Amino acid sequence: MKTVVFTDLDATLLDSDTYSWAPATNALQALKDRRASIILVSSKTFAEMEPLHGELGLDGPFVVENGGGIVFRSEMPIARQLQGFGKATELAPKSNFLILPLGVRYEDLVAALSEISVETAIPLKGFATMSVEEVASLTGLGIREAERARIRDFDEPFLVPEFAGMRENAIEKAARHRGLTIVHGSRFWHLIGHDGKGRAVSLLIEAFRRVYGNPVTIGLGDSPNDYPFLELVDIPVVVGAADREITLPYSLTKARLTSESGPKGWNGAILAWLSEVQT
């Protein structure tokens, strides 16, 4: 039976400080030996994810900018199914990647965040108004990686000042008034104009079902913006949650929780599941 693994990156498959996936090497190889499809589902941009996708040796689609788009190649087994969900466009002439857009354009999000900041009288600072050096400092990324993080299409990460307090609800209300959504990541809040990671993963699950029948689906994430796609999979895993206080939605009360965070927790969760299905 086909296995499909959907995974968040930061603080899940990637270490939140070093951005290394090395501690998950054994589990990644075990999944590849099983011919599982490993689908990256992240707030990161295409410019950030394309080199990582290649570094990991993956050959499936991936989800960018919190579900703003699904990236794939035309020769992938589920490409025809994805193209049936909407009009895919070429990302870059030499990349051989197509993208199925699912969200509002970035320039519209930047303008909306500025309006929301004025309307709520809360100074909200998004990536569009940050220098490359600021993004690097806030994220721990190198300058080149920070430049890639600023090449955005569907998602504006932003910071909310600590003094905002209870007025944070006003930000979400102002976003909803504009038909937009706020999602909470491990580092930033994000303004998006689509249905988040859940919508993208639901389309991918349907595409895999059309090609492979009824695959086993596993999802791994660490923060609330991952919950919508974790709710859709057969085996949801919340990485690093066993030893911290979190409030999970009712639909995830039976999710697996790992004590270790990042790629160590990811590695342990996948190897534990594989040991179950192989015995």
Image (cartoon, rainbow, N blue to C red):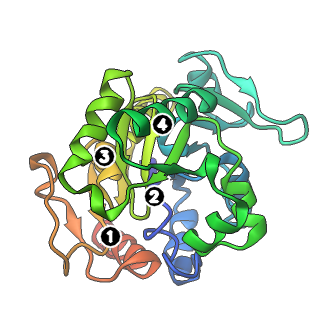
User: Is the residue under label 4 in contact with that under label 3 (CB below 8 Å)?
Assistant: no
The x, y position of residue 176, in whole percent, is: 31, 27
- Dot 3 or dot 2: first in sequence order is 2
User: Is the residue under label 2 in contact with that under label 1 (CB below 8 Å)?
Assistant: yes
Report the residue marked by disc 4.
113
**Disc 3 packing (10 Å; few <14; some 14–19; many ≥20):** many
Image point (53%, 40%), residue name: 155
Of tags 3 and 1, the one toward the viewer is 1
Of tags 2 and 4, the one toward the viewer is 4
Q: How far apart are marks 3 and 2 (CA)?
A: 13 Å
Of tags 3 and 4, the one toward the viewer is 4
Image point (21%, 66%), residue name: 256
The x, y position of residue 37, in whole percent, is: 54, 51
At label 2, the amino acid type is Asp
The x, y position of residue 101, in whole percent, is: 59, 26
Which secondary structure, mark 3?
Answer: loop
- Dot 3 or dot 4: first in sequence order is 4
Which secondary structure, mark 1?
Answer: loop
Residue 170 to residue 46: above or below: above
Image point (32%, 30%), residue name: 174
**Disc 1 packing (10 Å; few <14; some 14–19; many ≥20):** many
Q: How far apart are marks 1 and 4 (CA)?
A: 30 Å
Report the residue marked by disc 1.
239
Dividing the image into 4 quarters, which one contains the C terminus?
bottom left
Report the residue marked by disc 3.
233
